Amino acid sequence: MRRMAFVCLSLLAVLSGCSSRFVDFAPDEEAIYEQPIDEVWPLVRTYFSSRGFAMREAPGVASLETEWREEFAGSRVAGYWHRYLVTARPEGPHRCKLVITRETRSANKALRAPGSELVWGVDGRTAENPSGLGSQVSLETSMQAMTGGDATVQVQSQQTARDGVLEWKVFRAIAPELAKDAKKSSDTPEVVVTRSDDVECGVPILGLGKVVRPGNVVLLGELHGTQQVPHFIAQSVCQAAVQGVPVTVGLEIPDMNQERLQTFVASEGKEQDWAKLMESPFWRSPYPDGRNSDAVAYLIEALRKLRSQGLDVAVFAFDRPPLEGDAREEAMANTVMEVAGNSQDRAVLVVSGNLHPRQVKGLPWNPDYRPMGLRVADKFSNVYSLDIAYKSGTAWICAVSAEQKLDCGVKPAKGEDNGERYFVHLFGGKKQGYHGIFYVGAVSASLPAVYHGAEPAGDAQSAEP
């Protein structure tokens, strides 16, 4: 895997200067109110309370913390909890801004650095963080709130980050009620949110809106067998869909599973629906290579959940076993091109091993090799190929052992540390067949779904053959 390092300044340079409608789903400009805190704060409180958030406030300080809210309730794969810390800060004698921090906790390990435990220090309560968000006291309180006082839910991973998108959502909601000289919405970044109140999409992915647009085909070259890539895809789809961008996701799954995928994503996700999906031989391969992991099951369920919430989300399978080499690349490309040709008003995200998306001819052992990405780009103009970048960790990898046998298991994966926040970075041209990278932080292995019994895939029986 090619290793890359990028400094923050270069990333910020890429994220600025675009004037099209979809500037970015994560704006790099702050929302500034032209009123003092005492005028703005009552409307901020009303914004959160009117949307069903229970909250606590620190006395004498313009700061509140919402109670934990569960998303994808009842799911053992995709469910997680989140809450917000909201603080108003002065920006001069008569101006202010909101700083909103999102904390997410999940029973899924996708947000956890490999081999690490959550390390909590001292109390952590300060003037700017009166609730001690992220402290031991906060953790213990939140665990009680999430579990009803017992330890039935084990938090496996967490993520905390400032949420600039929500800051702009609040601004746009309350600005009309403020003074007439408030900053006009036409001066704000183009963050167009169609489903802002009832769909939670996680920490905004920097740079995502540069490529995930209607009519674009985005080929994502992944490292199979991680928790993070399917989690990245699920969040990307959600964040695009709430922007009003219809999304179709292509998975490197044998195309004989197409009907099962479509049926499940359109279903209610009951035990018989899971059984129908998981009865496919694909999930029980004797050599699972990471494409049939519990994280992939998480992704498929996340797509189903988003669709059930009224978002325009679709899925298709495009692998073509037992074909190999050029014949396989041609077959996969034909499927992707067929879907893309019928999806001119949609964003198409295609996930595969990172050899297939390359838009350059040749391999060291075969100079005439034409990957799927090159074939698709020959027919369509708006095709972006992104390679994975990640911080070192582990992945479920199949490799040939010294005894010339295929060995599948949890193995080290070496990468470069570019922080924990997901982002997309474009090169400004193509390098080795890629337009840029998508970064997923530290990776951790995702075992085959049948090993963990992801959702009811074991005892439950399908009602259909």
Image: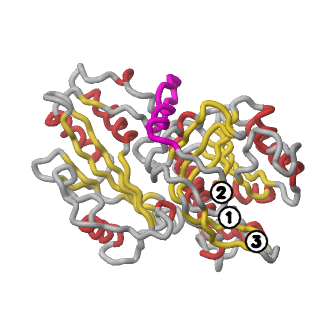
Marker disc for residue 326: none
Disc 2 vs disc 1: Cβ atoms closer than 8 Å? yes
Identify the residue position indicated by label 3 in the image.
Answer: 287
**Gap between marks 2 and 3, in whole Å?**
16 Å
The residue sitting at 24% across, 67% down in the picture is 137
Task: Determine whether, in the image, residue 409 is placed left or right of residue 12.
Answer: right
Task: Determine whether, in the image, residue 32 is placed left or right of residue 454.
Answer: left
Q: Earlier in the sequence, mark 2 or mark 1?
A: 2
Res. 112 visible in picture:
yes
Identify the residue position indicated by label 1 in the image.
Answer: 290
Q: Earlier in the sequence, mark 2 or mark 3?
A: 2
Rendering quarter of residue 150: bottom left
Residue type (three-letter) at the residue carrying disc 2: Leu
Q: Residues within 10 Å of mark 1 (few under 14, many from 20)?
A: many
Identify the residue position indicated by label 2 in the image.
Answer: 223
Local secondary structure at mark 1 = loop
